Image: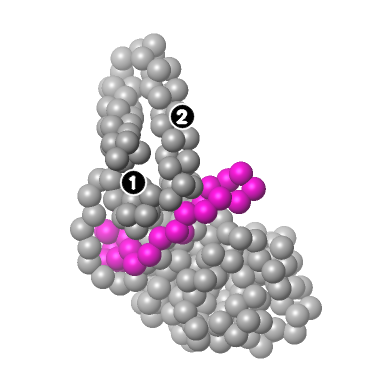
């Protein structure tokens, strides 16, 4: 992967960036995505935010090497605090992290989202946390995707401002993904069912504390919900 050719995962993320966008890529690593968006004319400007010094320095070098310093700003900052008001960012991308961490980044820096119209999140796991954050903060799910690359399954969640009501299953599995029920979707949730049943069996032999009882109830409910979807 490089600034000219992205992985399938990041290419899918890039496809949800609207033409002419001003993008902030949070946790940008080597700044591959911002450079690609500028090189292809998809974005007019971009911010590459990175909290770790090594990847930050790598991003700076990549941007300079490609001669894109006028279009891509690289900042060493925590989460959304890489965004400054004068950037006029309208699209935020957070990809390649756990859903719980992505939701935490969105929550802790949500005052930086005032000019933002679209959030493109690509969690590696626990996508539910992002959907729950969206509901609590008046963001609507406008699209979703699920794909498999190198044996791993990834989800993409696109958010825009709005109010929507989602049921328990929508939050867990995604309303758009439920509607399409792709082969990768079925593979993901069959994997989850196997793991949940394994954990449940191990809990059956554990001491019956309040925490264990609650966890068992949660697992049984998730198994029931997903089981019905896969059977239908």
In the image: residue 88, left or right of residue 45: left
Q: Position of residue 67 (x, y in %)?
A: 75, 84
Residue at 38% from the left image edge and 50% from the top image edge? 181
Residue 2, image quadrant: bottom right
Query: Dot 1 lies on which element?
Result: helix
Q: Main secondary structure of the magenta part?
A: strand
Q: Position of residue 139 (x, y in %)?
A: 30, 66
Q: Nearer the viewer, residue 150 or 80?
A: 150
Q: Is residue 21 visible?
A: yes
The residue that label 1 is drawn on is 172
> Upstream in the sequence, badge 1 or badge 2?
1
Residue at 52% from the left image edge and 77% from the top image edge? 23
**Vertical comparison of 97 with 12: above or below:** above
The residue that label 2 is drawn on is 195
Q: Is residue 133 magenta?
A: yes
Query: Dot 2 lies on which element?
Result: helix
Few, some or many residues within 10 Å of mark 1 (<14, 14–19, 20+): some
């Amino acid at each position: 992967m490089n600034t000219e050719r992205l992985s399938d995962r990041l290419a899918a993320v890039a496809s949800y960036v609207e033409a002419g966008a001003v993008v902030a890529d949070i946790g940008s690593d080597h700044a591959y995505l911002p450079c690609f968006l500028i090189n292809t004319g998809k974005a007019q400007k971009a911010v590459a935010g990175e909290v770790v010094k090594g990847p930050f320095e790598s991003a700076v070098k990549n941007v300079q090497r490609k001669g894109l310093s006028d279009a891509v700003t690289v900042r060493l900052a925590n989460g959304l605090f890489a965004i400054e008001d004068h950037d006029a960012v309208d699209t935020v991308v957070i990809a390649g992290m756990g859903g719980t961490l992505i939701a935490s980044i969105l929550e802790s820096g949500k005052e930086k989202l005032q000019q933002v119209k679209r959030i493109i999140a690509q969690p590696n796991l626990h996508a539910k946390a992002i959907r729950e954050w969206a509901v609590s903060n008046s963001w609507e799910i406008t699209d979703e995707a699920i794909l498999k690359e190198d044996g791993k399954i990834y989800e993409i969640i696109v958010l825009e401002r709005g109010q929507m009501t989602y049921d328990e299953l929508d939050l867990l599995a995604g309303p758009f993904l439920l509607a399409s029920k792709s082969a990768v979707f079925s593979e993901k949730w069959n994997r989850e069912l196997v793991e949940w049943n394994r954990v449940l069996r191990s809990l059956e032999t554990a001491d019956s504390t309040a925490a264990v009882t609650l966890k068992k109830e949660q697992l049984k409910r998730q198994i029931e919900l997903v089981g019905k979807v896969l059977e239908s």
